[in-house]
Image: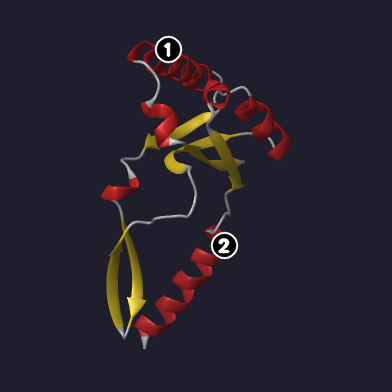
Amino acid sequence: MKYICLGYYEPAKHASMTEDERNAMFDECFEYDDYLRANGHFVGGEALQPQETALTLHWKDGKVATTDGPYAETKEQLGGILVLEARDMNHAIQLMSRHPSLKYGSLFEIHPTFDMSEMMNKSEQRRQKVAAR
């Protein structure tokens, strides 16, 4: 089963680290990612640019609107996502609990993915019926 792991960090804490400390942290994290890949658990992942570069898209007054952000009232910032393959939630917890970034103050949310294939197939069938009319 796939799990989406959202990684959060404190920008101020990250900025206070020396270059050597940051390099050591990244080296440990990338080494663990290599371990996950080698064992079939790393499905994908991406780091995110700072939230100042992001937008929030929403519906307002009958049309799409954007706002800067997101800006949460928290010290932590979403830093990246990791898609993990694990047997179950306990296995996902076990794998992510060994991620080196935790000891540097990061935290992870772990979300099981939802298989939408059945819903998509039913939607496709409905849309084909409408198109055939």
Give neighbour class at mark 1: few <14, some 14-19, many 20+ (Cα, 10 Å).
few
Report the residue that reaches farthest toward the right. Answer: 90
Give neighbour class at mark 2: few <14, some 14-19, many 20+ (Cα, 10 Å).
few
**Residue at figure coordinates x 28%, y 80% from the top left:** 63
Residues at discs 1 and 2 in contact (Cβ within 8 Å): no
**Residue at figure coordinates x 54%, y 66% from the top left:** 119
Quadrant for the N terminus in the image: top right
**Relative horizontal placement of residue 53, taking residue 93 as reference (left or right):** left
Picture quarter containing residue 102? top right
Quadrant for the C terminus in the image: bottom left
> As shown in the figure, which amino acid type bears the numbered disc 2?
Glu
Seen from the viewer's position, the closer of residues 6 and 38 is 6
Whole-angstrom CA distance, mark 1 to mark 2, is 44 Å
Residue 6, position as x, y percentages in the image:
51, 42
Residue 13, position as x, y percentages in the image:
44, 29
Residue 56, position as x, y percentages in the image:
34, 62
Residue 24, position as x, y percentages in the image:
42, 12
Element assignment for label 2: helix
Seen from the viewer's position, the closer of residues 18 and 80 is 18
* Nearest to viewer (mark 1 / mark 2): 1
Q: Which numbered marker is on residue 10? A: none
Identify residue for label 1: 24
**Residue at figure coordinates x 31%, y 40% from the top left:** 49
Element assignment for label 1: helix
Picture quarter containing residue 107? top right
Seen from the viewer's position, the closer of residues 58 and 88 is 58
> As shown in the figure, which amino acid type bears the numbered disc 1?
Ala
**Vertical placement of 67 versus 94: above or below?**
below
Identify residue for label 2: 118
